[in-house]
Image (cartoon, coloured by chain):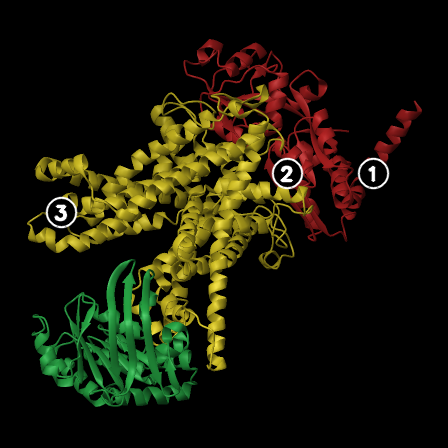
Chain colours: A green, B yellow, C red
């Protein structure tokens, strides 16, 4: 365990929202290239912890983050909260997929190409090529190649979620943050996403918020349990961690 | 922690993006402060110019009950009473009527008739104030005269017309909030076994308490701040009315009537006391509204008791149903009568001569020959005014709304929000008074050539409609789903990129709604231009500093000044033209909106 | 004798060159560019409009705007320099001349008359009756020989010159009841009284037409002829005013309106042109 390279190091991190304490004293290493699952009851602060990593909590007025966060890059260690890395660059490197498929009311292609050209300054042809690769990586290409001009909202839930994943992958991130990516999907679609994530494991550092015990057991390398804003684990033994999970996590998937 | 960070080890691309981000932030915050500064400037003007009343010890003479300027008596108390009596009576009529219409629209069935009723109410917002006034002068006043004896303008005529004017404001606020509650509680109510009407009385009305209050305050403020209807219909006698058939003068009409007095006379300074009074009342209304709507506390005590009482008794329920139907019928009939009368009087004269008189059309359009006896110059003036005011108000308003949504926090945001709301409540005649006194001040100080003009009118109207655009922008951005707001940042967009690419397009419909409202308001407003540069005759304006003709003023002018049947027909034609113009603005805005959405998709 | 010979010769010359003279006066506007803004007295509006129309038809490069508002607006706006010509329906007070440096140009005589609805049976009123009616002492038409109906009063706004003339010369500065309806122009007065069977108001004789009725005042018919002769006392001149001596286009315009070519316009508007 100790030999693993950390991707994120959190020391004494706390988050308050309008004076209410959401997270407190979080010490956590998130290893590079592995899948770390964050589990816990509703309201335990899982999503907030996830959003600490790409500083997304700051989009809410009245939120304050304390403590130290280190991000380990190839070029060295940076402290995102100290301004070592520009916010857009940080969020590009640390991509995120939301719980509900968050497609824009545009064409499938534009859903990927617009952010690409906006954030990375890609030209049209380059954006098309990157979008194609991302869609292939998200295993959506075969299903949508003939209707890239169609409104993204005409896709099924599972397809929309894969489109969102493709959109994030297109930004060439190092880390993927996934906030209960399967919870709004039916069983088959959830299985599809799960297989996809299994394929991505190893190439990206995955940080996943999850409710599903089975899902976590199949995918997780490490499990972090959140309880009342404090972290328990990982102990290194997934089954042991899962067993300490509060009840209510048994439901499928 | 700051959102933007110094560029260290990043490409120039990031630097450029961050620069844009900061520029957008600075510009939109600057735009936001325009509204703050305007509010402060208006207050300063009113206070400064009513100051001589204090310093010369004439303050008590203003607080008298008699207005006879030629005897040195400048009491504005009758006008304050007139404003209160007129606005409260109109409100007392319009609010129950509006509630009835809402209950009808939300009531069981939801058929075509109900949707049509709502459509008519929405359409009413596009009817210019001066058109209501004009039609009332020639339809309602003679009708009242026949019914109650040969009297002319009266409090009653003004109350009835004003009630119709403020009704759509009340209904739209009520309907918005009640429909939302109804959708939220529909299943619960059904599960409890309520009939639709019981659900409305027991669940929807109590659950929309905040909305009911907002509708009340907004409706009343609208009635208080109107100038044209009292000016045209209430008779303008500076007295306390004894009955509904007496004549009254409101503060707003008083300003319009007396603004021509000598600039250094106490009568002139007393106008600013009137302005200050109106300004103060609208501020108080805003202040009274804000904290309540924020907590949106539930309805309590007696009101709720009354509602349960009514809901439990079939007779009361029947009464409520009848009231709802009657209200809707009354409103539909009034609007129908207004339109039929307007159309029947204006369609026969509607031809090119109405617009161009005897002038060849091509020569008129090219500005080679002036048009006499035609509406062409008035149409062109109104169009120029709307375009100019929109060019100023829309970018600044949207930027201000963005600042409110994205960049400003804490006390600054509260201050901007307050100033926008307060500015929205400033009566247009007070805005006109502000523009007029601004010009007088400029002439006496730095710009001796300053004059009332198209530009001044456009600036004043832009300031008048600015709060609509600010509020509409901020509100439509606020109502976007949280996930959508987070999407841009999560992809690494700067806050400006996220706004530009995702949030503003997504909020486009709501923002455009505000823009449409603003343009309609700019096209129909009469009280502002009355004091800031409109003329009765003058042809096409040649530049920004020219005086101009405008449709609403032409209608107002012809209602009182017509010399012949042809003049009167011209008035009806102008009323129909203005109505068509405001409706056209709606359509153009819709087309633009459709195009914007298409562009955004590809 | 020599003088009258002179006059006759001039008159003859005028008559012979009438058409030529008309062209001459308007010809002076040819080649000119610019604008004239006019505001004030509502009685003046028909004359101003017609003069403006003629000038702008000959020369579209000149832009003349006409605005009402009443005498008060004329004084205020000309005084503040907001318009080039401010019209007044009364002579300026010494105070106004001193404060603003206004120069006056009278161009017509006009009477101010009481007006009633044509349906009203009353044909004649005395000055005393009119004073009592406007003071609110007489409130029913039957007290002055009419039907049994309450009297509705109409007066003009504070800025009106017509109101000042009426108030000074007929009401002898007596009170006007507070309950009187206030209308903002001569035209509005006509519309109001023509629609109200029991209404009484007052306005420029030039605005009287079939829709309203002007009763005899102390036995004298309110007509422009009587106003000019002095038989009808409630009369005034109509003025144009400028801040300082008029220059350029404004000067031309004033010369045009006060000159011989505009007499037909003034007469047609119902006033007696000043010679």
Q: Residue at x 9, y 80 (%)?
A: A240
Farthest residue in the front direction?
A: A2
- Is residue B364 or residue C174 the one in the foreground? C174
**Callout 3 touching callout 1 (CB < 8 Å):** no
- Is residue A186 or residue B223 the one in the foreground? A186
Residue that badge 3 annotates:
B199
Quadrant into which the C terminus of chain B falls? bottom left
Front disc: 3 or 1: 3
- Mark 1 belongs to chain: C
Q: Relative to residue C224, is residue B36 drawn left or right? A: left
Of the numbered discs in the image, which one, if any, rests on residue B7? none
The answer to whether residue A150 shows anywhere in this view is no
Question: Label 1: how many residues lie within 10 Å, few (<14), some (14-19) or many (20+)?
Answer: few
Instruction: Say above or below: B502 vs C248.
Output: below
Residue that badge 2 annotates:
C39
Quadrant of the rendered image containing residue B48 = top right
Quadrant into which the N terminus of chain B falls? bottom left
Q: Residue at x 52, y 16 (%)?
A: C134
Front disc: 3 or 2: 3
- Is residue B540 or residue B240 the one in the foreground? B240
- Is residue A164 or residue A219 the one in the foreground? A219
Please provide percent x and percent y for residue C250: 74, 42
Label 1: element kind: helix
Residue that badge 1 annotates:
C16
> Marks 1/2: CA distance?
35 Å
Label 3: element kind: helix
Instruction: Say above or below: B283 vs A32.
Output: above
């Amino acid at each position: 365990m100790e030999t693993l390279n950390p991707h994120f190091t959190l020391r004494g991190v706390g988050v308050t929202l309008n004076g209410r304490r959401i997270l407190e004293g979080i010490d956590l290493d998130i290893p590079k290239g592995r899948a770390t699952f964050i589990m816990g009851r509703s309201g335990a602060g899982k999503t907030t912890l996830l959003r600490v990593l790409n500083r997304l909590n700051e989009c809410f007025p009245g939120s304050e983050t304390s403590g130290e966060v280190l991000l380990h890059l190839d070029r060295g260690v940076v402290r995102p909260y100290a301004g070592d890395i520009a916010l857009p660059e940080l969020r590009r490197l640390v991509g995120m997929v939301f719980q509900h498929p968050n497609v824009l009311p545009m064409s499938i292609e534009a859903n990927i190409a617009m952010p690409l050209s906006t954030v990375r300054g890609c030209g049209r042809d380059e954006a098309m090529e990157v979008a194609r690769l991302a869609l292939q990586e998200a295993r959506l290409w075969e299903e949508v190649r003939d209707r890239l001009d169609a409104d993204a909202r005409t896709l099924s839930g599972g397809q929309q979620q894969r489109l969102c994943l493709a959109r994030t992958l297109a930004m060439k991130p190092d880390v993927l943050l996934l906030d209960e990516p399967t919870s709004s999907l039916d069983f088959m679609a959830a299985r599809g996403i799960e297989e996809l994530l299994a394929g991505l494991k190893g190439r990206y550092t995955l940080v996943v918020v999850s409710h599903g015990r089975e899902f976590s057991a199949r995918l997780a390398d490490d499990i972090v349990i959140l309880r009342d804003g404090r972290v328990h684990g990982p102990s290194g033994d997934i089954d042991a961690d899962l067993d300490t999970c509060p009840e209510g996590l048994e439901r499928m998937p | 922690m700051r959102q933007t960070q110094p560029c260290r080890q990043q490409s120039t691309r990031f630097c450029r993006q961050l620069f844009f981000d900061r520029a957008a932030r600075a510009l939109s915050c600057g735009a936001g402060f325009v509204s703050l500064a305007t509010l402060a400037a208006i207050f300063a003007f009113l206070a400064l110019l009513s100051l001589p009343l204090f310093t010369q010890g004439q303050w008590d003479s203003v607080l008298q009950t008699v207005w006879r300027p030629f005897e040195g008596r400048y009491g504005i108390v009758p006008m304050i009473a007139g404003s209160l009596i007129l606005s409260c009576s109109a409100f007392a009529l319009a609010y129950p009527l509006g509630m009835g219409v809402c209950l009808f629209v939300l009531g069981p069935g939801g058929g075509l008739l109900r949707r049509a009723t709502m459509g008519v109410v929405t359409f009413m917002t596009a009817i210019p104030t001066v058109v209501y006034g004009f039609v009332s002068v020639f339809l309602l006043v003679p009708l009242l005269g026949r019914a109650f004896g040969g009297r002319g303008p009266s409090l009653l005529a003004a109350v009835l017309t004003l009630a119709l004017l403020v009704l759509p404001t009340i209904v739209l606020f009520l309907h918005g909030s009640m429909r939302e509650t109804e959708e939220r509680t529909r299943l619960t109510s059904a599960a409890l076994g309520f009939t639709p009407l019981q659900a409305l009385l027991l669940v929807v009305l109590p659950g929309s308490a905040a909305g009911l209050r907002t509708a009340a305050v907004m409706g009343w403020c609208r009635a208080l701040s109107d100038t044209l209807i009292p000016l045209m219909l209430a008779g303008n006698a500076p007295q306390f009315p004894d009955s509904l058939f007496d004549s009254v003068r409101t503060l707003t009409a008083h300003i319009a009537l007396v603004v021509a007095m000598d600039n250094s006379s106490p009568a002139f300074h007393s106008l600013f006391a009137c302005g200050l009074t109106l300004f103060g009342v609208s501020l108080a209304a805003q202040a009274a509204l804000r904290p309540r709507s924020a907590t949106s506390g539930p309805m309590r005590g007696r009101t709720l008791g009354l509602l349960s009482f009514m809901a439990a008794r079939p007779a009361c329920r029947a009464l409520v149903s009848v009231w709802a139907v009657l209200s809707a019928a009354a409103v539909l009939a009034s609007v129908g009568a207004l339109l039929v009368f307007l159309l029947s009087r204006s369609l026969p004269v509607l031809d090119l001569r109405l617009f161009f008189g005897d002038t060849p059309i091509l020569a008129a359009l090219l500005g080679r020959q002036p048009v006499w006896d035609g509406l062409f110059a008035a149409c062109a003036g109104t169009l120029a005014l709307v375009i100019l005011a929109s060019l100023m108000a829309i970018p600044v308003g949207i930027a201000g709304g963005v600042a409110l949504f994205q960049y400003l926090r804490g006390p600054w945001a509260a201050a901007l929000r307050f100033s926008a709301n307060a500015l929205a409540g400033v009566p247009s005649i007070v805005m006109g008074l502000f523009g007029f006194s601004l010009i007088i001040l400029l002439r006496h100080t730095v710009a001796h050539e300053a004059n009332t003009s198209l530009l001044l009118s456009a600036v004043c109207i832009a300031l008048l409609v600015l709060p609509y655009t600010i509020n509409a922008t901020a509100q439509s951005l606020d109502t976007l789903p949280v996930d959508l707001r987070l999407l841009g940042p999560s992809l690494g967009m700067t806050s400006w990129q996220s706004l530009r690419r995702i949030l503003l397009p997504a909020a486009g419909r709501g923002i455009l709604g505000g823009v449409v409202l603003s343009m309609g308001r700019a096209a129909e407003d009469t009280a502002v231009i009355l004091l800031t540069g409109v003329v009765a005759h003058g042809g096409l304006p040649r530049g920004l500093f020219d005086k101009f003709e405008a449709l609403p003023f032409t209608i107002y002018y012809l209602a009182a000044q017509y010399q012949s049947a042809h003049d009167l027909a011209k008035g009806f034609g102008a009323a129909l033209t203005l109505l068509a113009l405001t409706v056209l603005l709606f359509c153009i805005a819709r087309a633009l909106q459709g195009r914007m959405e298409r562009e955004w998709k590809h | 004798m020599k003088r009258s010979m002179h006059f006759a010769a001039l008159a003859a010359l005028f008559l012979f060159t009438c058409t030529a003279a008309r062209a001459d006066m308007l010809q002076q506007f040819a080649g000119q560019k610019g604008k004239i803004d006019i505001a004030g007295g509502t009685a003046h509006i028909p004359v101003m409009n017609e003069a403006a129309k003629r000038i702008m038809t000959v020369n579209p490069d000149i832009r003349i705007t006409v605005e009402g508002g009443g005498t008060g607006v004329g004084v205020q706006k000309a005084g503040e320099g907001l318009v080039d010509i401010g019209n007044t329906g009364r002579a300026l007070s010494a105070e106004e001349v001193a404060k603003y440096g206004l120069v006056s140009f009278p161009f017509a005589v006009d009477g101010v008359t009481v007006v009633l609805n044509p349906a009203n049976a009353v044909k004649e009123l005395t000055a005393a009756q009119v004073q009592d009616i406007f003071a609110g002492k007489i409130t029913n038409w039957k007290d002055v020989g009419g039907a049994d109906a309450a009297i509705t009063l109409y007066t003009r706004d504070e800025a009106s010159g017509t109101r000042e003339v009426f108030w000074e010369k007929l009401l002898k500065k007596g009170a006007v009841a507070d309950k009187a309806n206030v209308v903002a122009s001569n035209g509005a007065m006509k519309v109001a009284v023509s629609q109200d069977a029991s209404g009484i108001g007052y306005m420029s004789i030039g605005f009287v037409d079939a829709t309203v009725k002007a009763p005899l005042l102390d036995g004298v018919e309110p007509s422009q002829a009587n106003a000019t002769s002095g038989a009808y006392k409630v009369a005034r001149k109509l003025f144009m005013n400028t801040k300082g001596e008029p220059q350029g286009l404004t000067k031309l315009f004033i010369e045009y309106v006060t000159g011989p070519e505009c007499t037909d316009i003034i007469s047609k508007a119902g006033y007696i042109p000043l010679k």
